[in-house]
Amino acid sequence: MTRAPWTQGNTSSAQTWRRRSRLPPNVHNRLPYARTIRTCTLNHLANTSPVHGPDLAGNAKLATVVANAKKAGFPKASIEAAIARGQGRSLNGAALENITIEAMMPPSVATVIECQTDSKLKTLQDIRHLVTKFGGTLAPTTYMFERKGKVVFEKADGVGPDEVLEDAIAAGAIDVDEDEHGKVVVFTDPSSTTSAADRLSSALGIKVESLDIVWDPNDDTKVTVDSESAAENLESFLGM
């Protein structure tokens, strides 16, 4: 999205988790995740930064995430911005504020838009403009979601939800799932996301691919997007 001088934003939607949606195949494959792989990687950087600080020499976990991001072709500026966000500041050192905007987008898709910005009023104005531009309206939506920690592990042979379940419960997980690529996904209380990820990674010998705090849509709030044009409009909005 085109926002304030420095803004980092994410959007969650009741329709955008492919595995749980009921979109026609031709639409299903193009609609993005509530959190894209790119966003998850940047959030992983931001979430790892506060644990032992932004210095790669003293934060081995952050150094690993940075190395993986570079291998994936992430620009240096994006990596540095994500690390700074984890420290609660922008690249120019300005303090960041968290803002959340709730909106209903066509066709009746609930969204939650979260941003960190050093220019709150400008960011609010820009996002409200985009919501209106894409046919949406500001309306309460967070009650349709549950705030959760989400940990995605790299795919490993012989490791699925059944093999992870017992250790996940011991680590404080509230749900264990598997995505369409066969990767184990563990949901936790937001406050225990990092500790649960570390404990499971150590206990099972599997690597963490990403960790994030997400708005997970309630099952009874999910709807079908039957129109390809409506799906494209939603995709365009979520990809701004």
Image (cartoon, rainbow, N blue to C red):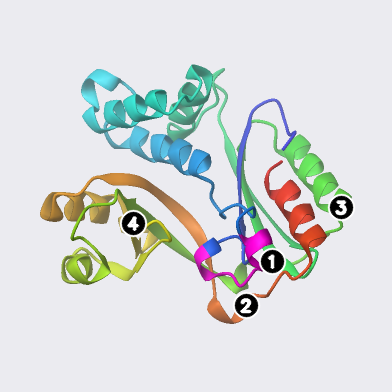
Left/right placement of residue 57 relative to residue 4 reads left
Front: mark 4 or 2: 4
Which residue is painted at 75% across and 44% down in the image?
A: 124
Q: Is residue 104 magenta?
A: no
* Alpha carbon separation for disc pair 4 and 1: 26 Å
Q: Residues within 10 Å of mark 1 (few under 14, many from 20)?
A: many
Q: Is residue 25 magenta?
A: yes
Q: Which residue is mark 3?
A: 132
Q: Which residue is mark 4?
A: 183
Mark closer to the chain start, 1 or 2:
1
Quarter of the image that includes the N terminus: top right
Left/right placement of residue 212 relative to residue 109 reads left
The label shown at residue 110 is: 1
Q: Are marks 1 and 2 in contact (CB under 8 Å)?
A: yes
Residue 207: image location, x then y, percent? 23, 45
* Alpha carbon separation for disc pair 4 and 2: 25 Å
Magenta range: 19-28
Q: Are marks 2 and 3 in contact (CB under 8 Å)?
A: no
Q: Main secondary structure of the magenta part?
A: helix
Q: Tag 2: residue type?
A: Thr
Residue 157's image quarter?
bottom left
Q: What secondary structure is found at the residue carrying circle 3?
A: helix
Q: Are marks 4 and 1 in contact (CB under 8 Å)?
A: no
Mark closer to the chain start, 2 or 3:
3
Q: Are marks 3 and 1 in contact (CB under 8 Å)?
A: no
Front: mark 3 or 4: 4
Q: Tag 1: residue type?
A: Ala
